[in-house]
Amino acid sequence: MWGGKGRRYPDLMGGTTISAIIEGDDLRVVRVREGLMGGRGESIGVIESALGPGGAERARAVLGRAGGGRLVLTVPSEWAAVRAISMRCAQWREGAGEVRRSVGGLLPLGSDDAMLGLIESVGGGGGYLIGVSAAQVRPWAEMVERASGKKIDALMTRHMAMLGLGLQDHERADVLEMGDGGGWGGGVVHRLSHGLVERLGEPWGEGDALADGSVVIGAAPAGVRARVIGAEELAVGAALAGRVAGGSFVALDAEPARAWGKWMMPIGALAVAGALFVGGGVWHEARLERASQRLDARIAQIGAEVEAVSDVRDEALATMALIEMARKEAAASSGKMLPALVSALESVPSGGFVYSVEISRDRLLMRGEAGRAGDVVRGIEDSASFEGAKLVSPVTTSRVSGGEVFDVAADRTKAGGGR
């Protein structure tokens, strides 16, 4: 269909990327010229109602004057289903097939329709599986390829594009997404550390704190002091993400990009200047950095090869984590955790999905989606394990499955093992 699989990001000397980003019904096109010091964006134009009547002609007019270079298409975050997974980019080549075969148990997508990618979580043992419906992306991708006369090199979600926003100098920075048309109600926030993802897609409500150096994608809510990022700047981020954070994510239906070490840009600058002989210091540290990266990748590869190969590996790991959590909590208190966990999971009707469950001695917090969020609240309330069930954030509609995304909390009862 489109040619993104196995493509590489540009070399050190830079290049040109035509970055197209979907905004509602429109498509914004930006030309990004990359160099040793980063990238510079130049707006080419906006294709209004790109899939509507006359959209093909408007697309040819805009993309026809974009010129040559890589072609990147970025889709809205709201199109994506996200789930934490015990996998890293170094394991993707060997493990992606298994994930795809069992994707129906991980995301509300069929294996034949799912376009999958991965974003690593820093400081954790895995990352976030990103899934988008190919049927939703296909009309846009085919329109872009027909109008430009070239294949798409990389398909991205906004989660991936934000890695190129230049937040690497901030120890902590949040990216707040309000969504197109308020699709998330209060919005979601992504927690970054030195420009890389720590936590992805946390619910955000008015008054919730943001770290210094944070940015907002979309209109900034009242009282929020953060730099506002428009679609044009996000398109530049999509073009640069592979250069500044390529080792930490896998674009949709692609293979892992080559990681760009933090010393690569200075070395490239020295080579251009003709400094062919470099003593110790930076050059020595650069070699150590690259050797360390290769060693980390090899260790991760060996870990992937040692793991048992089965279609249900990731589901088993997730279940083991829940059981381990329950065991530790049970050892710390006289209450029984597993019955409460089972009651919480059984409150989600058939066809629903649970993204995360947290159970303490006193409280339940659960996030997921179902046909009707109210059914989940009633199911928890009817359980002997919990009481006071309520929604703690606005219910939103998943653009992938059409189900209702919920965040529900409840108190544990004494009969259910609570204090």
Image: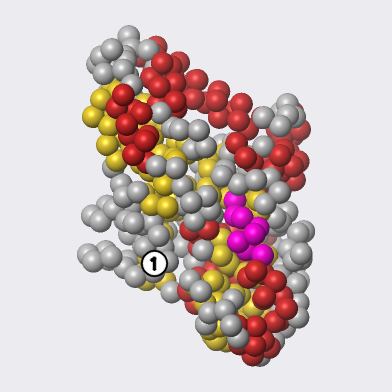
Q: Residue shown at 37%/41% (left/top)?
A: 373
* Residue placed most toward the observer, 50 or 310: 50
Question: Magenta stretch containing residue 155, yes or no?
Answer: no
Q: Where residue 24 sits: x, y (%)? A: 48, 71
Q: Where residue 48 sits: x, y (%)? A: 52, 82
Figure disc tally = 1
Residue 284 visible in image? no
Question: Magenta stretch containing residue 137, yes or no?
Answer: yes
Name the magenta segment's main secondary structure: helix
Name the quadrant containing residue 303.
top right
* Residue placed most toward the observer, 378 or 226: 378
Mark 1 Cα shell of 10 Å, populated few (<14), some (14-19), many (≥20): few
Q: Amino acid at mark 1?
A: Gly
Identify residue for label 1: 181
Name the quadrant containing residue 134.
bottom right
Q: Where residue 147 sits: x, y (%)? A: 70, 82
Q: Is residue 407 left or right of residue 283?
A: left
Q: Residue shown at 37%/12% (left/top)?
A: 336
Tell me where the magenta segment starts and ends, as one range. Answer: 131-138
Q: Residue shown at 76%/59% (left/top)?
A: 5
Residue 257 visible in image? yes
Name the quadrant containing residue 47.
bottom right
Q: Residue shown at 48%/51% (left/top)?
A: 402
SS label for mark 1: loop
Specify the quadrant that holds the N terminus. Answer: bottom right
Q: Is residue 124 left or right of residue 284?
A: left
* Residue placed most toward the observer, 189 or 166: 189
Looking at the image, residue 34 lies above or below residue 318: below
Looking at the image, residue 68 lies above or below residue 10: below
Q: Colour mode?
A: secondary structure
